[in-house]
């Protein structure tokens, strides 16, 4: 899972109101990952309401990011783009690598959900290249490979999508990663849609080829696919 909660600093020893704001923020993130968008949005708004008293820039950015993520899931693309882009700029300025990784993936998902398959494909490939050189976050690699698989599937390259999905499953098992409810439909829908576009033998063969790859091989293979 891409852990948005990890972008929130440890609030141990902070004053009482700051602790309350952070506790609400973490609850908001947890609700988001459980796909409870309404509760997550309510909690994020409550946490932001304490911002004036807390005066914590990072808390503010993180809760705006939650709201951007919710807007993405609700297909409010204009709002999602505005919020996510603002957060990306601020995380970049702060040198927050975890935040940057999270935002790069979700800005790519935004292009994917808008139906801009080529932009999404290019963005996921750029993310994989960036991760190779800056931050080999295995969870982030998993989600970007899945996004790339969906983008190439939408472009009609079903065998490549199946190979990438095989690599994704191998990586997921290696990481012992449990996909959060908010992301499960993405993984399931991509897999089902790809399988229906190929005959059983072709899908099984392509999937097995991807599953046989190491992490390094999978990333290199994805990047070579262009």
Image (cartoon, helix red, strand yellow):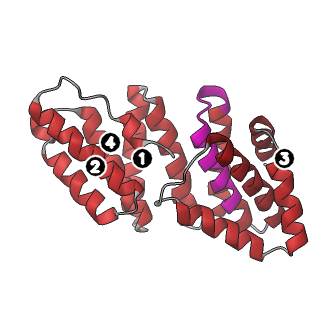
Q: Are marks 4 and 2 in contact (CB under 8 Å)?
A: no
Could you tell which of marks 1 and 3 lies nearer the N-terminus?
Answer: 1
* In front: label 1 or label 3: 3
C-alpha distance separating marks 1 and 3:
36 Å
Q: Which residue is mark 3?
A: 212
Residues 93 and 211: in front is 211
Residue span colored magenta: 132-150
Could you tell which of marks 4 and 1 lies nearer the N-terminus?
Answer: 4
Graded by Cα atoms within 10 Å as few (under 14), some (14 to 19) or many (20 or more), the crowding at tag 3 reads some
Give the SS element for disc 2. Answer: helix
The quadrant where residue 35 appears: bottom left
Q: Which mark, residue 129?
A: none
Give the SS element for disc 4. Answer: helix
Left or right, 54 with respect to 145, comes to left
Could you tell me residue 182's position as x and y percent? 46, 60
Graded by Cα atoms within 10 Å as few (under 14), some (14 to 19) or many (20 or more), the crowding at tag 4 reads many
Q: Which residue is mark 4?
A: 62
Could you tell me residue 82's position as x and y percent? 37, 53
Q: Which residue is mark 1?
A: 85
C-alpha distance separating marks 3 and 4:
37 Å
Q: Residue at x 62, y 34 (%)?
A: 131
Left or right, 158 with respect to 137, comes to right
Q: Which mark, residue 27?
A: 2
Q: Residue at x 26, y 45 (%)?
A: 25
């Amino acid at each position: 899972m891409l852990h948005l909660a990890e972008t929130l600093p440890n609030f141990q020893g902070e004053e009482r109101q700051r602790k309350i704001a952070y506790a609400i923020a973490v609850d908001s993130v947890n609700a988001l990952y459980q796909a409870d968008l309404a509760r997550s949005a309510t909690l994020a708004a409550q946490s932001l309401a304490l911002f004036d008293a807390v005066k914590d820039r990072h808390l503010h950015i993180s809760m705006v990011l939650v709201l951007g993520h919710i807007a993405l899931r609700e297909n409010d693309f204009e709002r999602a783009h505005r919020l996510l882009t603002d957060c990306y700029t601020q995380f970049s300025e702060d040198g927050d690598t975890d935040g940057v990784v999270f935002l790069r993936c979700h800005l790519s998902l935004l292009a994917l959900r808008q139906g801009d398959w080529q932009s999404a494909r290019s963005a996921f490939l750029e993310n994989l290249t960036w991760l190779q050189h800056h931050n080999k976050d295995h969870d982030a690699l998993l989600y970007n490979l899945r996004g790339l698989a969906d983008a190439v599937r939408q472009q009609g390259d079903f065998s490549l999508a199946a190979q990438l999905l095989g690599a994704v499953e191998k990586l997921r098992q290696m990481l012992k990663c449990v996909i959060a409810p908010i992301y499960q439909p993405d993984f399931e829908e991509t897999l089902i849609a790809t399988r229906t576009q190929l005959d059983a033998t072709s899908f099984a063969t392509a999937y097995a080829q991807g599953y046989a790859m190491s992490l390094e091989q999978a990333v290199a293979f994805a990047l070579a696919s262009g």
